[in-house]
Image (cartoon, rainbow, N blue to C red):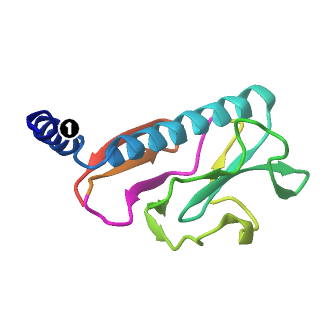
């Protein structure tokens, strides 16, 4: 009986030490993945002299390629494919300093919001990764015209 009580106490402290159930780490991981994919796509545009873009939904994002004069979702790319956020995670965005209302799904979008140009420039943006419960500090990714990207945490 004493062993069961001790196990119960240890499990309680373990659960309390986990805190947010790993949600902060998930936010950080998704934001870092976003930055890594944008960096990869930006390098690809420079090396291959092509124009790429990214569209954003509240729960997903997708890379695009300029083909002749039309934007098309990037086909058959294992890395730059449509990405779905984990359940409960939401994106908010500002493009060139203006808040943008994002659709839930990017399949209704006809062109990207953020352009990645072969010159190395990108559309200035701010993308905020946060949980739908708003209990955990958000992670913000900022992209500058020069192609530089930064990641930081903000309180609710």
Q: Residue at x 44, y 61 (%)?
A: 88
117, above or below 115, in the image = above
Location of the C terminus by quadrant is bottom left
Task: Count the labels in the image.
Answer: 1
Q: Quadrant of the N terminus?
A: top left
Q: Position of residue 72 (x, y in %)?
A: 83, 56
Q: Is residue 90 left or right of residue 65?
A: left
Identify the residue at horizontal 59%, vertical 39% (top origin): 38
Q: Is residue 146 visible?
A: no
Q: Position of residue 142 (x, y in %)?
A: 43, 47
Indicate yes or no whether the magenta region holds residue 147: no
The residue that mark 1 highlights is 14
Q: Residues within 10 Å of mark 1 (few under 14, many from 20)?
A: few
Q: Position of residue 71 (x, y in %)?
A: 81, 57
Task: Name the residue at the front extreme.
Answer: 1
| SS assignment at label 1 | helix
The quarter of the picture where residue 25 lies is top left
Residue occupying image coordinates x 75% and y 36%: 78
Q: Which stretch appears magenta?
A: 120-135
Residue 135, position in %: x, y? 25, 61
Left or right? Give the position of 17 relative to 47.
Answer: left
Residue in the foreground of this view, choosing between 46 and 93: 93
Q: Is residue 134 visible?
A: yes
């Amino acid at each position: 009986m004493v062993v069961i009580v001790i196990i119960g106490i240890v499990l309680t402290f373990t659960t309390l030490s986990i805190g947010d159930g790993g949600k902060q780490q998930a936010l950080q991981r998704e934001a870092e993945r976003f930055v890594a994919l944008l960096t990869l796509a930006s390098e690809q545009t420079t090396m291959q002299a092509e124009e790429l873009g990214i569209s954003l939904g509240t729960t997903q994002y997708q890379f695009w390629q300029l083909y002749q004069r039309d934007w098309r979702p990037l086909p058959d790319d294992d890395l730059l494919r449509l990405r779905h956020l984990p359940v409960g995670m939401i994106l908010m965005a500002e493009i060139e300093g203006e808040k943008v209302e994002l659709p839930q799904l990017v399949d209704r979008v006809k062109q990207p919001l953020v352009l990645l140009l072969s010159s190395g420039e990108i559309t200035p943006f701010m993308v905020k990764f946060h949980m739908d419960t708003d209990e955990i500090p958000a992670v913000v990714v900022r992209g500058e015209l020069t192609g530089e990207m930064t990641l930081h945490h903000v309180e609710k």
